[in-house]
Amino acid sequence: MPIATPEVYNEMLDRAKAGKFAYPAINVTSSQTLHAALRGFAEANSDGIIQISTGGAEFLGGQHSKDMVTGAVALAEFAHIVAAKYDVNIALHTDHCPKDKLDGYVRPLIEVSAERVARGENPLFQSHMWDGSAETLADNLAIGQELLAKAAAAKIILEVEITPTGGEEDGVSHEINDELYTTVEDAVRTAEALGLGEKGRYLLAASFGNVHGVYKPGNVVLRPELLKDLQAGVAEKFGKVSPFDFVFHGGSGSTREEIATALENGVVKMNLDTDTQYAFTRPVADHMFKNYDGVLKVDGEVGKKSTYDPRTWGKLAEAGMAARVVEACEALRSAGTHVK
């Protein structure tokens, strides 16, 4: 399948909402992690979302220039070619982008897609994220209005984060405290500013105790039932049932019960990065430890080329990450939902 068209992406999200499942959104930083994600989705018979953060895009841009737009565009163009060999639909997305990086990342990427659409082509990315969680809600939504209008014109879906997610992600960090819970008032103000689809479709990253990164059970109190209150509060005011398409941030380490509750309350996308990073790296570490005298030239020896060849350990890394993507698809109920 090719990368999802705007129409297919909207259909994907509609089916997830109606079927009470969600797509894993897998962060990638290389062509190899891209293939691992694609492989995982294909093996799970699930459509999916692949995303690039600002840090991931900077890494992809090369350490000589560290240009985020170059890195993101290059991998997206690569994805448009190789994804056609996988029998699932894939949407390309950019992850967290704070205010100080908008001009160097999301705004120029939207312009790239606008130029493509003007030529009669599909957008390069299917959605972009604006992370205004460090701003006041008023400023957050004002910027969100500007970006939503530009995104809609380029046939792109916008993702907005209106309140903080704990932990740290590419330089954006928030303390783990009682502020990590979106209120009905926050949700109402969002609907008033961004509409409920008539100004362009958007995904809403609401906070219900989410934390980025690694955490042990008991350190974070997730309240996915809060999403039901947000849906109901806005529905009562605006008369639209289940108005929001929610995003689950900080999904690594969540229990199956927490995920299930989130799905019942309108989550259609869940981000995974920490768990898939580990799943990619763990087989490499295992290979290096077991073959240390082959990957290193120890005591004057020459090592063993077949063990330090990047293809050898790279295949193990791809398989490990792909398996974690399959596991995510099963937990989010998207496995087996691809419609040819």
Image (tube, helix red, strand yellow):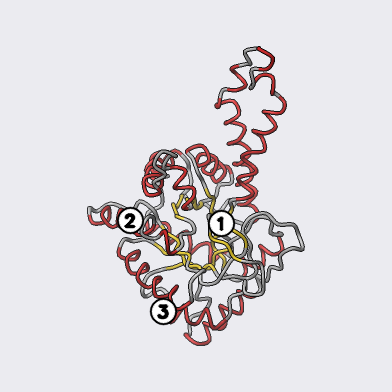
What's the distance in space between the residues labelled 2 and 1, CA to CA? 21 Å
At label 3, the amino acid type is: Ala
Q: Is residue 224 left or right of residue 169?
A: right
The residue at which mark 3 appears reads as: 193
At label 1, the amino acid type is: Glu
First reached walking from the N terminus: tag 2 or tag 1:
2
At label 2, the amino acid type is: Pro
User: What is the number of the mark on residue 169?
Assistant: 1
Say which of 30 and 10 sits in front. 30
Say which of 265 and 26 sits in front. 26
**Which callout, 3 or 2, points to the residue nearer the camera?**
2
The local crowd at label 3, few if under 14, some if 14 to 19, many if 20 or more residues have their Cα within 10 Å, is some
What's the distance in space between the residues labelled 3 and 1, CA to CA? 26 Å
Q: Is residue 259 left or right of residue 206?
A: right
User: What is the number of the mark on residue 108?
Assistant: 2
Quadrant of the rendered image containing residue 219: bottom right
Residue visible at 39% across and 46% down?
67
First reached walking from the N terminus: tag 3 or tag 2:
2
User: Could you tell me residue 83's position as x and y percent?
Assistant: 44, 42
